[in-house]
Amino acid sequence: MCRSIHTLHNLEPAVTEEEVRAAALQYVRKVAGTTRPSRANAAAFERAVDEVAHATAHLLAHLVTSAPPKDREAVAAKRRARAQARYAAAAPSATTV
């Protein structure tokens, strides 16, 4: 799964249309294998983004849960901490010779 696609369900404040569209765009980019379609494929690409966004919004509107909503800032802070740890582990260590 793309790291830039995040859980959109059960967040407070609720997810926006822009966030749904951004997730749909990332999904279509991943499936298509390109970040920008050619002119010949642009219409199909945009139509796919629209359809995935619509399906995502429909899904989110119909999901139910008894769990309390998650705080967006707390979720974002956890993501940032994980990313910082991941990138720190991947960075080459400086050694003196």
Image (cartoon, rainbow, N blue to C red):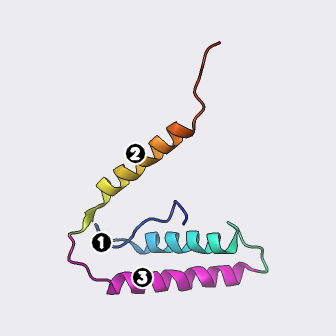
Q: How many numbered badges does the structure rendering display?
A: 3
Q: Residue at x 54, y 66 (%)?
A: 1
Mark 3 or 2, which is nearer the eye?
2
Is-magenta flag for residue 97? no
Mark 1 or 2 closer to N-term?
1
Q: Amino acid at mark 3?
A: Ala
How far separated are the C-alphas under marks 3 and 2?
28 Å
Going by the numbered disc 1, the residue's amino acid type is: Asn
Q: Main secondary structure of the magenta part?
A: helix
Image mark for residue 57: 3
The magenta segment: 41-67
User: Going 51% across and 69% down the picture, which residue do you hit?
Assistant: 22
Residue appearing at x 50%, y 44% in the figure? 86
Q: Nearer the viewer, residue 90 or 41?
A: 90
Depth check: give the residue in front, 9 or 39: 9
Q: Nearer the viewer, residue 72 or 50?
A: 72
Mark 1 Cα shell of 10 Å, populated few (<14), some (14-19), many (≥20): some
Q: Which mark is residue 81?
A: 2
Q: Give the residue pinned by disc 1.
A: 10
